[in-house]
Image (tube, coloured by chain):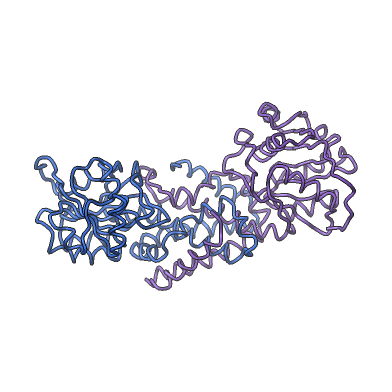
Chain colours: A purple, B blue
Amino acid sequence: MTPEAPDGPLKCNKVAILGVGLIGGSLGLALRGSGFAGEVAGWDIDEAVSNAGLQRGALDAVSGNPEDAVQDADLIILAVPISATIPLLMTVVPFLTDDAVVTDVGGTKARIVREAEAIIGGRFVGGHPMAGSEVSGISAASADLFEGAAWIITLTEETRRNNFNVVEEIVRTIKAIPRTCTPEEHDALVASLSHLPHLLAYGLTQTVSDSVPAEWGDLAAGSFRDGTRVAKSNPKAWAEILLDNRDSVLKALDQNITWTAKARAALESGDLSSLTQLLEQAHLARKRFPG
Amino acid sequence: MTPEAPDGPLKCNKVAILGVGLIGGSLGLALRGSGFAGEVAGWDIDEAVSNAGLQRGALDAVSGNPEDAVQDADLIILAVPISATIPLLMTVVPFLTDDAVVTDVGGTKARIVREAEAIIGGRFVGGHPMAGSEVSGISAASADLFEGAAWIITLTEETRRNNFNVVEEIVRTIKAIPRTCTPEEHDALVASLSHLPHLLAYGLTQTVSDSVPAEWGDLAAGSFRDGTRVAKSNPKAWAEILLDNRDSVLKALDQNITWTAKARAALESGDLSSLTQLLEQAHLARKRFPG
């Protein structure tokens, strides 16, 4: 991060949220419920969604296009699918004020931050709220989705402190917990903590679906239900995320495949001691994590 | 099942629960809370656990050894780890009344039912409640653990209808839903619906634990938490279950490994279309299942 003396109190008179889905909508609801004094403007590619955001109270105003929404905004939050983030940034860049800060909420960071910095340099500060839901859309949005949740803000050599501070203040305003790391560190972390669990959930679902006759499907107990919950997430969005974070996901996946091969070998050879040891070690490791 | 005319109303004046852990304890609480008119006797290898069962109201009486507990019992429920089930049955067989029925609650059925039938023939009727928890022990027991949950009762050529009816009535009494299949069908079903999810949960936990630095562990969001919840289950008990159901688990695991290999190939080659298709298909399959 570029060292830079703070230049007085932050002023953020207008936030523009581009994309009013689960994340964008919840962000608007949280901001407007927080006592944030500025304006929360919004735009969604689907006009009905923009209007729903307005009606649900997530936005003060909606625009018919993103260029209008960003006019005079101090902070622009790109809350669209990761494949649409950079194209949307390119669309609005000519309409940004000189000191506008841009952030996003995408589940991958290295590529997005690199491409965004190539366009607007340190005025882009990448973000990723570590909260979400397998359901999507403005109808699922809630004002407390981010409360107490980590919100990663990425730092690079280009990041300017004043711009970082604007994003951090908004994150604190909605009661999320700001955490910082590089885009590359972020991608390695989420490959393990989020992307691998999603991939395994889809695979478990398919395996069980292929092997359990329809009339027994209702027997699926807690272990299946919990282990496959996130397979209810949008598959198109997840294929994009996994590919966007391909190298880190492959690395995490290969570690997992190695473990599975060891467990399979112990199982096939009837080696109770090795299998017990593998499960025991994982069981103890689980205690390191919350929940 | 041997065809056999019902011989009048069932009489079950005494149930003996051997093993007063999560399942045995919950069963006692459920029975005693159900208006069941008979006696609920119990024994646990740990005297303190027997006494806790008595104090929590899961049992009317406790015995110092299993031989005493089964005296005059009409139904004996073996609620011990699967490796202890057959040894315990052999211990109590000489002390059973002539028409006593024996059932169990083990998570695997083919071996247990085969071995139990070799000892007491059709007087053994295998059972498996499809409910549980990653926590164990009498302290976690609850009267409503089985309410609305499926309870598989196994049928073989040796199963006698009267004996089956005794088990079925007890299952209905505690508001579980009896379902029937052969021990082999049961083992194939649970290999997919329960054993594979457990194995994957342990593997996911280990992978993430190995790759995420300690200071970032708290970032584990919903997908990790849910996907690894059952890794909190007793690893020794699960190693036994997986090995006891080795062939079916290997089959389910190999199907899963095949899916994962396909997803890995799509990921590595950057094939968005194939990856999307794999996730999409699994996503649709998830809708077949409850929860």
Of the 4 image quadrants, the one containing the N terminus of chain A is bottom right
In depth, the one of B248 and A128 nearer the eye is A128
Which residue occupies 62% across, 63% down? B212
Residue nearest the observer in this picture, A282 or B26: B26
The residue at the point 54 percent across, 60 percent down is B261
Q: Is residue A185 above or below residue B31?
A: below
**Image coordinates for residue B143, horizontal then vertical, percent:** 33, 46
Q: Residue at x 82, y 43 (%)?
A: A90
Q: Would residue B185 be seen by someone viewing this image from the given angle?
A: no
Hey, which residue is sitting farthest front in the picture?
B55
* Left or right side of A237 for B131: left
Give x and y (percent) for residue A167.
Answer: 78, 47
Out of B188 and A132, give the one closest to the viewer. A132
Query: Is residue A122 something one can see in this rendering?
Result: yes
Q: Nearer the viewer, residue B76 or B269?
A: B76
**Residue B40 in the image, given as x and y percentages of width and height:** 21, 50
Vertical relation: B155 (above or below) B206: above
- In this picture, residue B230 sits left or right of residue B142: right
A131 up-or-down from B204: above or below? above
Q: Is residue B107 left or right of residue B231?
A: left
Which image quarter: residue B93?
bottom left
Circle count: 0
Q: Percent from the top left, x then y, of residue B5?
A: 10, 42
